[in-house]
Structures are given as structure tokens and as C-alpha cells.
């Protein structure tokens, strides 16, 4: 059985949609539609991010249900969207950087690895891993300050009278601009990039593993189950083998499954780093009566003191759910976006191929 985007013979073959390279895209349409689509996805998933963040900075284990109930009771639905405006403002430039670095790197590295003699599957995995690494590093230039501000807005509305849920978040911010101004006044510009190093250590390898796993899973699933999803009986009757062309529903289903599989592994591996990163960006310590940013060592020590190694995995359930839902919606939206943004002549060429 083979996977093909160009060939058409009598052997068992699955015609998956051809990949769309950077040079085939209408850039203005790509970025405009991307901003609109990804903003909608971010709005839908934002409450899960708020839950994850509050669980990570809590000194005691709190279930998702109890945390959700407390937010709804004390803050209402608005509590699930604290800091959303700030996050949304950062989403547009960060996504633009992310998608540009992703597509440019994937296209260039993919071409280079094929020329070096790697197989198509290996070349795709290497290109996706490199693209995930470079895109994560590029996006963090924007995401880190947005994370610092939005996460502080997320946690400041907690009811601290019960079990001291969120300690050491003393500043009260009116909005994202006010939070940014107070952080810079207290810690300088570097305060906005608190946790930048560990953010790179968290997201760069995570993205590399995710994109490599996604590309491998994508090909394995089509290769292993593609024939059984198509018209196998008709192919056998006609004696032509399995010549399956997946429709849009099958394509989206496989993309979603691959995204969820890649997200599960990535969430488990990088969860401790993400918890440390969140605490570094949100919480402060005290030294001689003065507020000071926590160090990585102090953060890890506090986590271990609070609950051992398990404390590093607080918020795993919402993070796993968030990553899986986000990745599934993002990748299907992303692939849809790429096909919507394809230049007309390239679209006609692809249409002739798939018909």
C-alpha cells in the first residue's frame, strides 16, 4: 500500500490531499483569515486555560469541578475570561510569527532533506520538527509578555479568603495596559519576559515533538487504515485494488485524531516545565520584607514542599484537554485556512489532481 499525492496506478493506493507549500499561499488572505479563525478558537478554549493557570499556582490541590464552581459563584462567567482581551491582542501578531516561521521552515527544510536522500516520511518528520522548533521560538518573543500580563489578570480575581487559593498576587490591575505599566514600574522591561528561558525550554521541544509526531501519525493512520475507510468492496470487485480518495470528513477526522495523539504525549512530557513557567510568571516571593521575583530553584522547591513531584502535574487534566481540543481545532482550522488561502492557479492545479 502506498500513499500518493501524484501517482495513479492499479496498486493499492490512498490519495491523500497534496501538501500546500509557502509559495503557493496568498499571504494577505492567509494572515487575515488566520487572525479571524484563530481568534474564534482562542475564545472557545480560553476558560480551560484559566482553569489550568489557577490550578498551577494554587498551593493546594483543587479539582477542576471545585475550581469551576468557585469561579462561577464568586465571579460569574466573566471570571473565565479574565485577561482575554490582552491575550487576544497578542494572539494576532504571535500567530502571524508562528505561521510564517512554521511554513517557511517546513518548506525549506523539507526541500533540503529530500535532496539529501531522505525518504519522504523521514523528510516530512524532520521538516515538521524543525518547523515546530523555529515557530515556537519566534512566537515566544510576543507570547511571553502576553502570558505574563494575561496570567496575572486570570488569577487576581480568585477568592483568597478560602484556603488562600492564590498567594502572593498582591497587585490589583484594572486592565492589561495597567498591568503592563505596573509590572514594568516594579521589575523593569525584563519583568514582562519573566520565564522567557523556561518558556523556550517548554514550548520549543514540545512543538518539535508535536509536529514530528503529528506528521508520522498522519501517514501511519492513512497507511494502516485508509483502505478500510474507502470503498474496499468495490475495488475488489473491479479487480483494481484499493484506490481510495478520502473526502473532507475523513480528512478532518484523521487530522483531529493525529492532533489529539500528539497532544497527549506532549502534555505529559512538558507539564512540569509548564507549571514552573506559570508560577515564575505569576507569583512573587518575599525577601527582607520586599517583594522579589521567584527563581526557578525556589519555585521547584516550593512545589516539592507543597506536594512532591505530583504538585508539578497540577492542572494536567485541563491542560491535556486544552491541548487536545486546541490542537484538534487548530490543525483542522490551519489546514482549512491553507486551502482557503491557496493562490487561484495553484488551487486549480490541485483540483485537477484530486478530480
Image: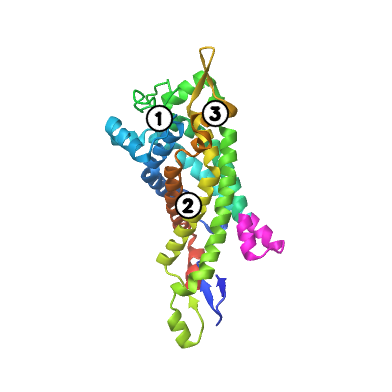
What is the quadrant of residue 269 in the picture? top right
Say if residue 298 shows up in the picture.
yes
Separation (CA) of disc 1 from disc 2: 34 Å
Residue at 58% of width from left, 29% of height from top? 296
In what element is the residue under mark 3?
helix
The percent position of residue 121, horizontal first and vertical second, equals: 61, 63
The residue tagged 3 is 299
In the image as oriented, which residue stretches furthest toward the right?
A: 116
Q: Which residues are magenta?
A: 109-127
Mark 1 and mark 2 in contact? Answer it, CB < 8 Å: no
Q: Is residue 89 left or right of residue 191?
A: left
Q: Is residue 117 magenta?
A: yes
- Indicate which disc residue 82 carries: none
As helix, strand or loop, the secondary structure at mark 1 comes to helix
Nearer the camera: disc 3 or disc 2: 3
Badge 3 crowding class, 10 Å Cα cut-off, few under 14, some 14 to 19, many 20 or more, is many
Q: Position of residue 47 (x, y in %)?
A: 37, 40
322 lies above or below 3: above
Residue closer to the observer: 146 or 159: 159
Find the residue positioned furthest to the top: 288
Question: In front here: 225 or 65?
Answer: 65
Could you classify mark 2 by the number of other residues whose Cα lies within 10 Å: few (under 14), some (14-19), or many (20 or more)?
A: many
If you read the primary sequence from the N terminus, does the residue marked by circle 1 or circle 2 appear first? 2
Residue, x 49% and y 44% (percent of image)?
Answer: 95
In magenta segment, residue 262: no
Which numbered mark, 1 or 2, is in the foreground of this view? 1
Q: Looking at the picture, does residue 25 appear above or below residue 190? A: below
Q: Which residue is mark 2?
A: 30
What residue is disc 1 on?
155
Q: Earlier in the sequence, mark 1 or mark 3?
A: 1
Amino acid at each position: 500500500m502506498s500513499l500518493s499525492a501524484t501517482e495513479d496506478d492499479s496498486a493499492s493506493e490512498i490519495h491523500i490531499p497534496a501538501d500546500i507549500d509557502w509559495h503557493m499561499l496568498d499571504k494577505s488572505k492567509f494572515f487575515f483569515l488566520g487572525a479571524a479563525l484563530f481568534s474564534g478558537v482562542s475564545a472557545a478554549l480560553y476558560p480551560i486555560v484559566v482553569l489550568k493557570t489557577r490550578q498551577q499556582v494554587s498551593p493546594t490541590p483543587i479539582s477542576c469541578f471545585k475550581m469551576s464552581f468557585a469561579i462561577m459563584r464568586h465571579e460569574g462567567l466573566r471570571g473565565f475570561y479574565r485577561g482575554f482581551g490582552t491575550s487576544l491582542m497578542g494572539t494576532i501578531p504571535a500567530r502571524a510569527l508562528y505561521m510564517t516561521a512554521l511554513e517557511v521552515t517546513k518548506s525549506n527544510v523539507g526541500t533540503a532533506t529530500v535532496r539529501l536522500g531522505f525518504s519522504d516520511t523521514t523528510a516530512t518528520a524532520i521538516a515538521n520538527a524543525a518547523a515546530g522548533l523555529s515557530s515556537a521560538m519566534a512566537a515566544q518573543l510576543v507570547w511571553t509578555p502576553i502570558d505574563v500580563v494575561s496570567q496575572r489578570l486570570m488569577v487576581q480575581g480568585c477568592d483568597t479568603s478560602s484556603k488562600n487559593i492564590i498567594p502572593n498576587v498582591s497587585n490589583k490591575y484594572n486592565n492589561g495596559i495597567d498591568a503592563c505599566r505596573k509590572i514594568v514600574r516594579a521589575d523593569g522591561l525584563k519583568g514582562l519576559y519573566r520565564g522567557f528561558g523556561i518558556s523556550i525550554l517548554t514550548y520549543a521541544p514540545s512543538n518539535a515533538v508535536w509536529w514530528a509526531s503529528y506528521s508520522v501519525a498522519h501517514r501511519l493512520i492513512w497507511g494502516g487504515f485508509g483502505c478500510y475507510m474507502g470503498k474496499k468492496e468495490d475495488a475488489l470487485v473491479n479487480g483494481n485494488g484499493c484506490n481510495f480518495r478520502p473526502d473532507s470528513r475523513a480528512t478532518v477526522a484523521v487530522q483531529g485524531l493525529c492532533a489529539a495523539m500528539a497532544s497527549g504525549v506532549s502534555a505529559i512530557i512538558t507539564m512540569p516545565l509548564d507549571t514552573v513557567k506559570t508560577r515564575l510568571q505569576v507569583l512573587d516571593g518575599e525577601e527582607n520584607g520586599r517583594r522579589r521575583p521567584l527563581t526557578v530553584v525556589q519555585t521547584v522547591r516550593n512545589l516539592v514542599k507543597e506536594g512532591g513531584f505530583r504538585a508539578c502535574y497540577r492542572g494536567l487534566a485541563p491542560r491535556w484537554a486544552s491541548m487536545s481540543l486546541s490542537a484538534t481545532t487548530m490543525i483542522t482550522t490551519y489546514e482549512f485556512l491553507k486551502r482557503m488561502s491557496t493562490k487561484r492557479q495553484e488551487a486549480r492545479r490541485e483540483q485537477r489532481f484530486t478530480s
